[in-house]
Amino acid sequence: MFWANPLVLGIGTLLLSVPIILHFLMQPKPKVLSFPALKFVREREVTNRSRMRLRHVLLLLLRCLLILLMAAALAGPSVASRQFGQWLILSGIGLTSLIVAIALAATYFAARKRNWFLITVLGLLLAGQLIYGGYSAIRLITDPSPQMLGDSQAPVAAVILIDTSPRMDYEVGGKRNLDKAREMGAWLASQLPSSSDVSVLATDGDQPFFSVDIAAAKERIKTLETDYQSSFIPDSLNRGLELLKDSEQERKELYLITDLTRRGWTGGEAGAVLDQLKEHEDIAAFVIDVGEDKPKNFTLGELELGDQTITSSSPVEITTQIKRLGEAAQRNVVMKIERPDQQGVRPVLRDGEVLVPDEYWEVSQTVDIRADTETPLRFQYPGPLPQGIHHGSIEIVGEDSLVHDDQRFFTIHVRPAWDVLVAHPDNVNPANLVDLLSPFREQEDGTAIYNCQVIKQGQLSQYNLNDFQAVFLLDPTPLSEGSWQDLEKYVEQGGGLAVFLGYNAAIAGGVDPSFTTPAAKKLLTGEIVRQWRRKAENPLYLSLDNFANPMLEPFRNREDAVPWNKHPILNHWEIKPDGLSTELPTETVVRYSTGLPAVISRSIGKGRVVVMTTPITDPPRPAGRKLPWNYLFTGYCWPAWKLVGEISQYVTQSSGDNLNVDIGTTATLRNDVRRLPDSYRVFTPRTKQSPTKIVSIDNMVKYRFTNTPGQYRLKGQRGNTVLRGFSVNLDPVETDLTRMETDEIDEVLGFERYQLAREQSEIQRQQGTARVGQEFYPMLLIMLAITLIVEQLMSNRFYSK
Amino acid sequence: MSVEKYLKPEVINQIKRLDLRAQFVVKGFLHGLHASPYQGFSVEFSEHRKYSHGDDPKDIDWQVYAKTNKYYVKKFEAETNITGYLVMDLSQSMGYTYQQELTKFDYSICLAAALGYLMVSQQDPVGLITFNDKVRESLPPRSKRTQLGNLISLLSRIRPHGQTDFSNSLGQIAAMLKQRSLVMVFSDLLVDDDSIFDALHRIRHGGHDVILFHVLDEAEVNFPFHGPCQLQDPESGDEIKVDADGFRKEYCQAMEAFRESLASDCRNSGIDYVPIDTSMQFDTALLEYLHSRKMRF
């Protein structure tokens, strides 16, 4: 049996002596009366005296019972199993019924005047008790679920799951939620009966295990820290439940200590948790809320870089937003771009600490943020920046309860513009592509990232292709086998080639044979077999197919919003795949609505080829033809614009390096070992951490351990120092402090399947209920009331004047 | 203590038309109401009988002759006197009342006064004997008018005291009675021994007419107490603690049985048993009794 306030029980036991003392000391003195007919009294006196004594004892017992019940009710008893509790309640009902029955009998038979109202009330009370008692008894007998009997000091198997998400670093008054959680966890562990099995589990994805003893569990709780790659709570719960259900202890308890922010619950196998809790009814679940009811926070949104590769004359442009949870406020927001140190030695490890450049170019803004809103921010640093990798950050200056979302990091690559060669036949206008790659204004500013050389297709042989990063063939006319071979060689050596097939490839009834030569087939990913034509009223549309391909990255998550149906396609070529995709990785990136390929990419050697089977240069009314092959660049043509832009980046391989990644993602940088070091030392944002070494494999360097937000710097040597790097950011959703509603928790854990608590006292009480299942406070109060009534009746009868 | 306290005029009015007769034939010749074996000398009409020779012609009822034209003589029974003794229990318990105006003793005096008045007014001699553990006071029977005053003044002087020795006292009284008398005993009969009837039988066997007024206090009959009580016997000083509420029924039963057994014994012995409690109007009680007695004799 568990007592919420055992002290009261002790006091109650002491108080029990009071009615006994009173009974003997304060017994009412009988009235002394002169009475001559004593002889008749004497005859019956013996029986009367014993009856009177019995009544006094009864009254004394009733009074003792009264105090006992009062003390017991205040001490908050509960027992270790629901079934046992039911038996106890049944006994309580029995006892109370007995008392009521006695009172009823006394009222009916013994009273001088029958109080029918009282008799009715008592009768109804007795009937109600008997009916409820009968119902409880039947339910108890027919209840099949076996419940353990036990006392609260029997050992338990307990899993204490502590939320270690970055949100738990939310701080109020110098105390983080995690600190509160750790205190609570340690307290819980100390509350557990000795020789219990305790497992301390964090939401970091670790496998759970039972600690050696409670002290070890407490030690583990002390060392817990927040983890940027926190797993979802349902998954952690599942792991904890798996451990618990295999435990041999009879009582099993699961404690989840969390700030109840919604983010932690929005993923993972919530259904499995519900199923497990349903299946294992013997596991008592507690959710302990250490969060703030109304959290206040500033959140800096995800950074959107204008471009992560820019030319030195381009400005650095970043847009983001600042989100406020709480009342309106004003904050200073600063963009900092690291200024490389004079000696060019940083980052460097000195005296066990990593030193990084500590001078910055800065832009700052003061922002008025309204309550619970998002305020957009736009930063621009006009430059110029020296060529190379630049790290920077945007930071909200000033105090905030949660610091993780007050700073975001970015890395940009400043390099010279890419030289590209655009070759077009006479009847093709390259203006669309040139405008796209190198807008006139940017050419003027010197900020264009492509440096376009536009030539006639016939002049192709006059240029050294290796001077160019990529070659674009716009609706090519037949090329000689030699030209195809030159292009193949160029691609193999790392060049990029984009071919937009169109009208010029056709001869009467089919394709020009020069497009089906072996070299052409290799570059065009297969043999052109036929030209498909559609009527204007029944056109085709593009359909994005392979979102894994970096070319489609801008279209991810918004595929339904791309208005491809505004841009019909009437004609296209069909390429029959040559089956070389295993040795020459080939992917169909975009298809037509018929399923035939529209954009195909292929890697040959170190270079890449992208073939589009419909042109991008057909005007709406082409000369000498009735209809164009497509309307991709007609009207508000942003999808085509974007697609072609991505194709350009892909073939120039300027899109290859993602310099800004999310936490936990592998950062991949291309590393041409002919020009770049074959190994690097990686300096992580943890300044106390020594750099680790990574080696280039297949012209790539990969770094997996991106578990801390900040800048990761790669330092290598090839002749002189080569600095590279990338930034890692925490997804803003990870610091969303929106709280869970109770019904949302119910969805995961089941309605009334868990106990929600905030304070230790609540936990203690609920622990009692759950370890046990049953509390007797209400029943004891009812018994108390009934005993009081009976005591009053009896004493009134005894001591009436 | 004045006569008026015990014999109020309204009581006299109530009872003066009644008489108290002995249930046996009184031998003697005085002025009383009591039937006598000597006929023709009394005022009490007995019967009509045909005139026969030798009858005193002055006895002829001329009214009957006028109606029937025959001679009838009126026959009279001779009436004589009876000596009455008012025997009062003087014990301490007789001085008890719980919440009535009169103690049992006072109540008995009232009864005795009324009866004394009745007898004196019948010109019967009436005497008084009081007793507790033995005979204490006695007043010889007289039929003078002043006797009533003497009786009452004696009674009003004395206070109940001491214990009762019923059989001894009545034994003494039995020895004191010289001629056949009407013995009226006033007592609560709250004595421990069972020899009440031995003494009464002795009186009865002496040829005396006995009326037993069993006077109890209302509280002794109904036991009106509540809660725990400590009851004290005024005579012996014994104490008993009881729960009055739980005890009432049993007490009443016991008291009822006691009175029943007394009534039954009295019936068997030819004694008039008059159970009375002090809550009854004593004049009403007396009238009722006298009426019923008149019906019987």
Image (tube, coloured by chain):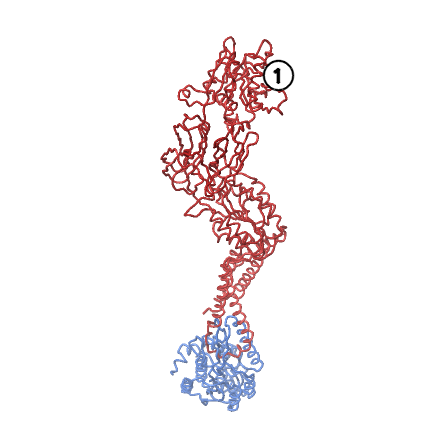
Chain colours: A red, B blue
Name above or below for residue A710 compared with residue A280.
Answer: above
Nearer to the camera, B205 or A236: A236
Nearer to the camera, A96 or B175: A96
Residue A116 in view of the camera: no
Q: Position of residue B71 (x, y in %)?
A: 53, 81
Q: Is residue A332 left or right of residue A433?
A: left
State the SS at label 1. helix
Q: Position of residue A227 (x, y in %)?
A: 50, 42
User: Which quadrant, please, contains the N terminus of chain A?
Assistant: bottom right
Chain letter behind tag 1: A
Q: Which residue is mark 1?
A: A518
Q: Is residue A179 left or right of residue A571?
A: left
Q: Position of residue A382 (x, y in %)?
A: 38, 28
Nearer to the camera, B67 or B79: B79
Q: Give the number of marks.
A: 1
In which quadrant of the rendered view does residue A104 lie?
bottom right
Residue A448 in view of the camera: yes
Name above or below for residue A310 compared with residue A104.
Answer: above
Q: Position of residue A349 (x, y in %)?
A: 47, 40
Amino acid marked by disc 1: Pro
Residue density around tag 1, few if under 14, some if 14–19, many if 20 or more, within 10 Å? some
Nearer to the camera, A535 or B283: A535
Name above or below for residue B173 compared with residue A473.
Answer: below
Which residue is at 54% across, 38% downward?
A: A267
User: Which quadrant, please, contains the C terminus of chain A?
Assistant: bottom left
